[in-house]
Amino acid sequence: MLTPFLEEEKFVKLWRRLDPEEKERFPALVVGVSDSIRQEALNRGINLDKEIEEGRLMRSVVELVTTDVLARVLTQPTDQPTAADGAMVLPNGELAYQSVAT
């Protein structure tokens, strides 16, 4: 398993303090979000971990993308069905959202 792009401490600094339920969900969510971002990049022929390691992509950019997606997930109501939306990292490093029909 690859390391998530973001630790809880950094997420709190970039967004806000987590409530107890969010703290409990955070470890699983950050792994899923990090893997989703990696997969979307890999689908476009980009290995984000390698790009970061080799200095072609700043880690802070990926941390901000991860924070953005996690914040959106955490603000979604958990007591009702929601639309399935996917996030993807474009080759230029921007985050794009794609609606997925259910």
Image (spheres, grey):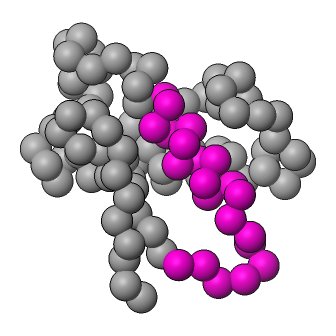
Q: Is residue 51 above or below residue 77?
A: above
- Residue 80 belongs to magenta span: yes
The image quadrant that residue 18 belongs to is top right
Q: Residue furthest right?
A: 20
Quick one: 2 or 70, which is closer to the camera? 70
Where residue 70 sits in the image (x, y, percent)? 59, 48
Determine the main secondary structure of the stretch shown in magenta. Answer: helix
Q: Residue furthest bottom?
A: 102
Asked if one can make out residue 38 in the rendered structure from this viewpoint, the answer is no
The image quadrant that residue 1 belongs to is top left
Q: Residue furthest top?
A: 55
Residue 92 in the figure: left or right of residue 60: left
Q: Which residues are magenta?
A: 63-83
Residue at x 65%, y 26% (from the top left corner): 14
Quarter that holds the C terminus = bottom left
Where residue 49 sits in the image (x, y, percent)? 28, 28
Quick one: 99 or 10, which is closer to the camera? 99
Where residue 61 sits in the image (x, y, percent)? 41, 25
Residue at x 49%, y 53% (from the top left corner): 32
Where residue 94 sits in the image (x, y, percent)? 31, 38
